[in-house]
Image (cartoon, rainbow, N blue to C red):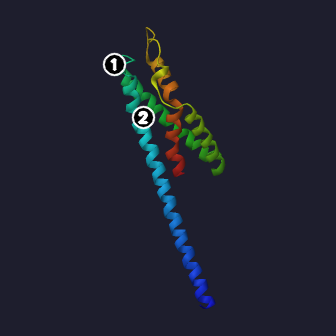
Amino acid sequence: MSPIDTASHAVTGAKAASASTIWARRAVFTAALFLSASLMFAVQPMFTKMVLPELGGSPAVWSVAMVFFQGVLLAGYLYAHVLTRHLQPGTAGAFHLCVFVLAWLTLPIAAGAVTGSAPGGNQVFWLLTIFGTCLGLPFFALSANGPLLQA
């Protein structure tokens, strides 16, 4: 084999390795986005249905749940925006990994924090506190995952 053939073979091999690496990265990226979105949108009705009987079963519980989930989703997007604008990519990734570890420490998601009955007057803040303590940090971390992966 001549030196030219050897060099050509090395370049072809590097291109093939590069193409397989790109394909693997895209597959991991796609799987991470799909898993994050699936978990996030599966948790919403699951947790709301879990606590609904304990919280009275009224339509107000569903309304407060939607306000909570949309608010935390917006907060997660804002967090992702701040991370990508003000931190280097490696630092932002490490910081988000720390947030994920903290969220992981609050698992499993359970309605065990729902104790006692709602205060007599306005139940909205009480319900938001229940949702926040049981589900807040894991949902926040998942909601920021998509925008951070796409940044």
Mark 1–mark 2 Cα distance, whole angstroms, equals 19 Å
Q: Earlier in the sequence, mark 1 or mark 2?
A: 2
Element class at badge 1: loop
* Front label number (1 vs 2): 2
Give the residue pinned by disc 2.
Answer: 43
Q: Residue at x 63, y 89 (%)?
A: 3
Quarter of the image with the N terminus in it:
bottom right
Element class at badge 2: helix
Q: Is residue 3 left or right of residue 129?
A: right
Crowding near the residue tagged with mark 1, few <14, some 14–19, many ≥20 C-alpha atoms within 10 Å: few
> Viewer-proximal residue, 92 or 26?
26
Residue 118 coordinates in the image, percent (x, y): 44, 12
Amino acid, disc 2: Val
Observer able to see residue 75: no
Q: Residue at x 66, y 47 (%)?
A: 91
Residue 129 coordinates in the image, percent (x, y): 50, 21
Q: What numbered label is drawn on residue 100?
A: none
Q: Is residue 116 left or right of residue 61?
A: right
Q: Is residue 128 left or right of residue 83?
A: left
Amino acid, disc 1: Ser
